[in-house]
Amino acid sequence: MSLTVVKPGLQTTLQGSPFSSHRHIGMPAAGAADCLSLALANHLVGEAAGAIAIEITLDDAKFVAEKHSAMALTGAASFFRINGEDQSLHKRIHIKPGDEIHIGPADQGCRSYLAVAGKIDAQSLLGGQSTYLGAGLGGFHGRALQAGDEVQWTGKSEPDPTATKTPIELRPNLSGKYIIRVTAGPEISALTLYSQNKLFEEKFQAGRRANRMGLNLHGIVLEMENDEEMQSAPVFPGTIQCPPDGEPFLLGPDAQTTGGYPRIAQVIRADRHLIGQLRPGSEIQFVKISCQRATEIYRQKLSLLTPWLGAVSLW
Amino acid sequence: MNIVDIHIFDDTLFCQLGDLDAVQAASSALRQQTIWREIVPGLESVAVQFDPAQITPDEASHLLREQLLKPLAAAVPQIEPIAVPVCYDKIFAPDQEWIADKMGMSPEALIAWHSNLSFTVTMLGFMPGFAYLRCQEEIAKIGRLPKPRQQVEAGSIGIIGDQSCIYSFSSPGGWPIIGRTPVQLFRPENNQPALLSANQVVSFRSIDKAEFEKIAEEQYSREPGE
């Protein structure tokens, strides 16, 4: 079974669970930038939360179906049309051979996930199948989809007949404004006390340079206590670093594994899926909490999702 | 082991260990423990990641402290030294003259000098298989390029003084480039995907353009998994 790509949009890749246990050899996480939207899409078609799906970025995208299949779309798309007819997001739909699938550009948010009932063919390496563009590996020949590509899948999962629509209360509310909770980073004191406070008082805007590796944060310029050079140290998706120019940046799923700028904060695990929906201009308010509170929030979030998704983890 | 400080995130711990030997000993020891999802060494610290649905940050921190307090003797495996072939031809070494100038030697002398040095891999990071190297010998500070390049070719060898690096994939970068190796630094299909490992001794063997092309060809025609 397959879908043919007619219009790939800005950047469309195959993404599922991240790579793990290879960061010490420099391998980033990759995987779906918004793991919650991915899990919700996969659930509607009977696939595991981290199964490979199609991640679409900002722009609209078009596909043509080759066979009968079930699919579902979640995330930021402004519309979902089959042969010109509007369909709901967060709902399982059935497509037939020749159907034209049109996924609208993102109104709010940044990424959408198109899941299909079946196992999408993707390069399997390092224990994962997600696309990592930096090294051209995984996913669809290690690259973003292009017009004419055929995304194929095998098998046919049997979706739960009662799980055809995501419950309203579980659908992420995408707006242009985000409250993102963080814990203090190991080098927070590289900032002046004044700037440490400002980081959590002022709002930031996601800059124009935003991609799967990360995004710049505009707003106030942070002041450094000193310009002492630090030794390269581990960084992760969700780490906020501040270079000497005082304009912090937030790391995404494809970010490098080590960095040499002060790590001033870290997005809590429960909120990291939001990073995948940030786009140039998004307004971000960082709220500092304790690690203990972050763990509580994460466990609460999982317990809200479990009745619908089953045992699930976010990354 | 002298644990200076553990910094806690909700799913990651950062342990400041002071020096690279301690980092490498700790990393190998921690790799024996199944609780850690990632063990990532830096130059002076190590990070471990855990599943916060299973254990709390405080529990994880206690566990890490306990594990690091045990004696870590003989934890670092010995790794065979490696000679990496490098072509110093100017087409592969855009900054050779700039570096030679900074070092106060001729490009010819620079090549002879560089291919006689011995380096040790301090860590892998930045990109898959990208290696940071350190030279035992004291080398004058060369520094990074005033303006980073949009594209540094895969295999490029950078040097900023007693620190050196090998780019595993083409990427933007700011290290001055002294030469290029035709050898692939990262093969994801292999059991050990990265060519180099932390603590490995690396020297550079000077090759000409013809040998560069020959090795490059062999590299790309090899069957996966070799």
Image (spheres, coloured by chain):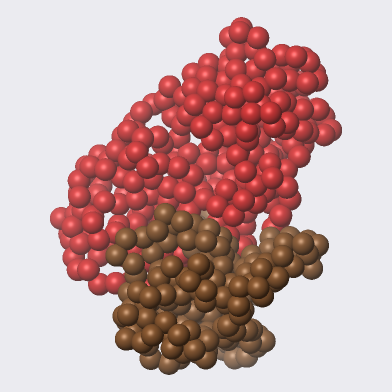
**Which quadrant would the C terminus of chain B be assigned to in this image?**
bottom right
Picture quadrant of residue B45? bottom left
Measuring 25% from the left and 39% from the top, which residue is drawn there? A203
Q: In the rendered view, does A87 fall on the left or right side of A241?
A: right
Q: Residue at x 73, y 43 (%)?
A: A122
Residue B1 in the image: state x and y as whole percent: 48, 86
Can you say whether A96 is above or below A10 in the image?
above
B111 w.r.t. A46: above or below: below
Can the viewer see residue B54 in this picture? no
Toward which corner of the image does residue A287 lie, by quadrant? top left
Chain that is coloured red in the picture: A
Exactly how many numbered labels are in the figure?
0
Q: Is residue A96 above or below residue B82?
A: above
User: Could one spot residue A119 in this view of the protein?
Assistant: yes
Which residue is more in the foreground, A293 or B35? B35
The outermost residue toward the left is A194
Q: In the image shown, does A61 or A42 lie closer to the viewer?
A: A61
Question: Is A188 situated left or right of B218 in this image?
Answer: left
Residue A46 percent coordinates (x, y): 74, 30
In terms of depth relative to the viewer, which is nearer, A49 or A256?
Answer: A256
Q: Residue at x 45, y 85 (%)?
A: B108
Q: Position of residue A30 (x, y in %)?
A: 57, 49
Pick the residue in front: A129 or A51.
A129
Residue A101: x, y in percent? 65, 17
Give the residue furthest to the right. Answer: A155
Residue A294 lies, with reference to residue A149, above or below; the image says below
Point 69% across, 51% down: residue: A128
Look at chain B in the picture and name its colour.
brown
